[in-house]
Image (spheres, rainbow, N blue to C red):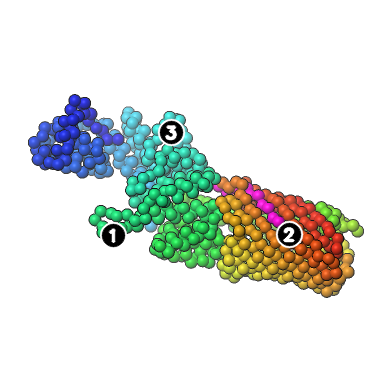
């Protein structure tokens, strides 16, 4: 804080009048006035923030009183007040020894370095942390060199928090904050609260970050420097990451509404766009995307790009939103434009790498990520991208277990199905080798039937295409040959996809058929059209050739649309049609000559918990409709399920589901209840 000369109460009215005259008369007053009156007038102008006038009066007075120590001291203080701390320190060294003043100026210089490190852009090839690290070293020197000045030391330690965050050293900033006493935390000055809140967010402590920013209060329009962003943005992220969406929305929407769209600057006839309004609007759109309101976010981002087509920020976030909506190729195009507008934007480059991952185009991911790590090793987003990529290219393990109880012809009274697969890390950017095992068992009225397949496979992945080939020797009831299976998934574009799976000894052949020594080959092919995350349709065909001569052909058609989107809550409704035909009837397994079903479906996804990679969902599925079988009366069919998905941390997920299914078989209603358990480890 500026060091001011106290003004005796008896002289206050005189000083106010003198200061007013000094501001108006300037040099004439300086030549005529007593040095004491000059000092008092200068102090008053400093207290009012009139540094330019105070400096003019002081320098004019120094022409007539060049050796006056108090005037020389005021000159130094005014320069320090105005931010010219380097020049102030030079002049202070020419004055009689004043340790307190020099300590204050040393602290000012170091603090200015901290502010510049947090504010000023970094040259493309420069070390982004150099300025922050240098400011930390300067402040450490101030603390060490002025231990006898507690006020200076405290201020330097507070400024050090700002410098640490600017240097990407949030862990150290939070450690220093944790070491403070409760009283020290309660008296933190406003300029420290925001960088400290950002550090707490980096360390995943959003509630504490929000409390700090709430103390700072909202910034008034016009008070935010153009080189800084609105503190409301950080508060929005704190609320959002703490799971308080309503507060986050109110905070950013209020801040955006408070900022005028246009600003009139002195000397300019035309208004200029207000960067703080644009930035607040952008973050309001991003918040909606984080809450799952992707369509709303997309509309806002597209409008922003239309208004500011040369903005790398708007274009980048539009691309990231498009990727989230399932349009990676469109995202790739917009991110390329954003990269051209700002080649050094870290968010753009990370978005491009994530788009390559979505497309399965892995060759450039590792080099691109290594390049980012070389330049921004302390960046939290870069570190998260590294962890996600290492999980995706590393080992993958999946397991699923289903237990069934009921009285259906294909599953009997009790059944179970087990699947486990372990895939190797990514090889040569395209390949994985994996081991897979499947086991199915059913307690049929005529006896138990079971089948176990275990073998090896290889999966390849290229841009938009995945393909696999696996060989699974088979053991169990009946006499099946080794299953050779292959398939592919081809994302033809952002809206169309085609997948096909074929097996020489299909696992979809009913266990009842295996019990009687019947096996067969299967083929399943599906074409999907996906408008966005809100609407999709599919057409599938299936074929099974049984060893007893039966040929089964089936087709299904489905459409699904989002009818409700709320933060952390989504409801999809759909309709499905199914029909099949068999060349034989009267076989040992359920095999109607013709049958079909029409159902309406509903799927509810409710996010109970979502916090830093930890998620907990509850899922409700419902399908009801009508089933018809040739030669039998039509009847209702229903499938109901409730489950939960839990991800305790990124890369590990568990799930369970209870299901109930009822359908007429050969004119007799039969039901089946299931318990499904799943595990996934990897990315």
Query: Which residue is tagged 2?
Result: 624
Nearest to the eye among marks 2 and 3: give it. Answer: 2
Query: Which residue is tagged 1?
Result: 270
**Residue 118 seen:** yes
**Alpha-carbon span between mark 2 and mark 1:** 63 Å
Residue 181 location, quadrant: top left
Q: Nearer the viewer, residue 300 or 585?
A: 300
Q: Nearer the viewer, residue 341 or 644?
A: 644
Task: Tell me the SS state at disc 1.
Answer: loop
Tell me residue 459's x, y (percent).
66, 64
| Dominant secondary-structure state across the stretch colored magenta | strand
10 Å crowding of disc 1: few (<14), some (14-19), many (20+): few
The answer to whether residue 183 is above or below residue 649 is above
Magenta stretch in the rendered image:
612-622
Task: Decide whether residue 618 is among the magenta residues.
Answer: yes
| Label tally | 3
Query: Which residue is tagged 3?
Result: 185
Q: Nearer the viewer, residue 612 or 623?
A: 623
């Amino acid at each position: 804080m500026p060091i001011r000369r106290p003004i005796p109460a008896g002289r206050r009215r005189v000083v106010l009048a003198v200061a007013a005259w000094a501001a108006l008369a300037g040099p004439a007053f300086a030549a005529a006035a007593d040095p004491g009156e000059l000092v008092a007038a200068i102090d008053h102008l400093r207290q009012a923030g009139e540094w330019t006038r105070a400096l003019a009066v002081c320098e004019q007075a120094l022409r007539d009183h060049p050796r006056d120590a108090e005037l020389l001291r005021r000159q130094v203080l005014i320069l320090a007040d105005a931010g010219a701390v380097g020049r102030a320190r030079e002049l202070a060294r020419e004055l009689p020894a004043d340790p307190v003043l020099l300590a204050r100026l040393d602290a000012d210089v170091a603090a200015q370095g901290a502010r510049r490190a947090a504010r000023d852009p970094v040259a493309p090839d420069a070390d982004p942390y150099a300025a922050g690290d240098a400011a930390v070293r300067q402040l450490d020197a101030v603390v060490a060199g002025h231990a006898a000045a507690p006020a200076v030391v405290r201020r330097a330690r507070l400024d050090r928090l700002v410098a640490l965050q600017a240097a990407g050293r949030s862990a150290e900033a939070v450690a220093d904050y944790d070491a403070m006493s409760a009283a020290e935390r309660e008296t933190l000055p406003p300029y420290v609260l925001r960088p400290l809140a950002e550090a707490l967010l980096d360390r995943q402590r959003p509630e504490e970050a929000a409390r700090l920013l709430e103390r700072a209060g909202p910034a008034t329009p016009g008070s935010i420097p153009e080189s800084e962003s609105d503190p409301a943005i950080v508060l929005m992220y704190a609320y959002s990451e703490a799971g308080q969406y309503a507060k986050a929305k109110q905070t950013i929407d209020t801040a955006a509404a408070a900022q005028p769209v246009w600003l009139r600057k002195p000397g300019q006839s035309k208004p200029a766009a207000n960067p703080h309004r644009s930035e607040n609007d952008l973050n309001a759109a991003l918040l909606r995307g984080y809450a799952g309101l992707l369509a709303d976010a997309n509309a806002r981002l597209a409008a922003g790009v239309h208004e500011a087509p040369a903005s790398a920020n708007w274009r980048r976030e539009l691309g990231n939103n498009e990727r989230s909506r399932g349009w990676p190729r469109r995202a790739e195009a917009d991110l390329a434009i954003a990269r051209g507008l700002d080649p050094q934007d870290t968010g753009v480059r990370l978005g491009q790498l994530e788009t390559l991952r979505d497309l399965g185009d892995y060759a450039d991911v590792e080099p691109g990520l290594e390049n980012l790590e070389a330049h921004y090793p302390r960046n939290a987003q870069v570190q998260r991208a590294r962890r996600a990529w290492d999980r995706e290219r590393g080992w993958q393990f999946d397991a699923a277990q289903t237990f069934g109880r009921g009285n259906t012809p294909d599953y009997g009274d009790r059944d179970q199905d087990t699947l486990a697969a372990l895939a190797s890390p990514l090889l040569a950017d395209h390949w994985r080798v994996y081991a897979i095992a499947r086991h199915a068992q059913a307690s049929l009225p005529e006896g138990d039937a079971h089948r176990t397949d275990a073998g090896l496979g290889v999966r390849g992945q290229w841009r938009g295409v995945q393909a696999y080939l696996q060989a699974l020797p088979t053991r169990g009831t009946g006499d099946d040959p080794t299953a050779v299976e292959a398939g592919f998934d081809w994302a033809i574009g952002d809206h169309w996809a085609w997948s096909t799976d074929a097996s020489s000894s299909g696992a979809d052949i009913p266990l009842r058929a295996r019990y009687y020594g019947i096996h067969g080959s299967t083929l399943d092919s599906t074409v999907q059209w996906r408008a966005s995350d809100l609407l999709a349709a599919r057409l599938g065909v299936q074929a099974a050739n049984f060893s007893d001569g039966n040929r089964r052909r089936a087709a299904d058609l489905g459409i699904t649309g989002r009818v409700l989107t709320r933060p952390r809550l989504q409801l999809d409704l759909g309709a499905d049609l199914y029909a099949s035909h068999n060349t034989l009837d009267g076989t040992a397994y359920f095999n109607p000559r013709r049958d079909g079903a029409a159902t309406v479906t509903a799927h509810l996804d409710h996010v109970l918990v979502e916090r830093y990679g930890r998620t907990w969902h509850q899922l409700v599925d419902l399908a009801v409709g009508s089933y018809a079988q040739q030669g039998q009366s039509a009847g209702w069919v229903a499938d109901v399920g409730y489950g939960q998905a839990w991800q305790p941390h990124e890369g590990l997920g568990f799930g369970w589901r209870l299901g109930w299914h009822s359908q007429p078989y050969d004119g007799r209603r039969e039901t089946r209840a299931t318990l499904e358990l799943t595990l996934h480890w990897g990315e």
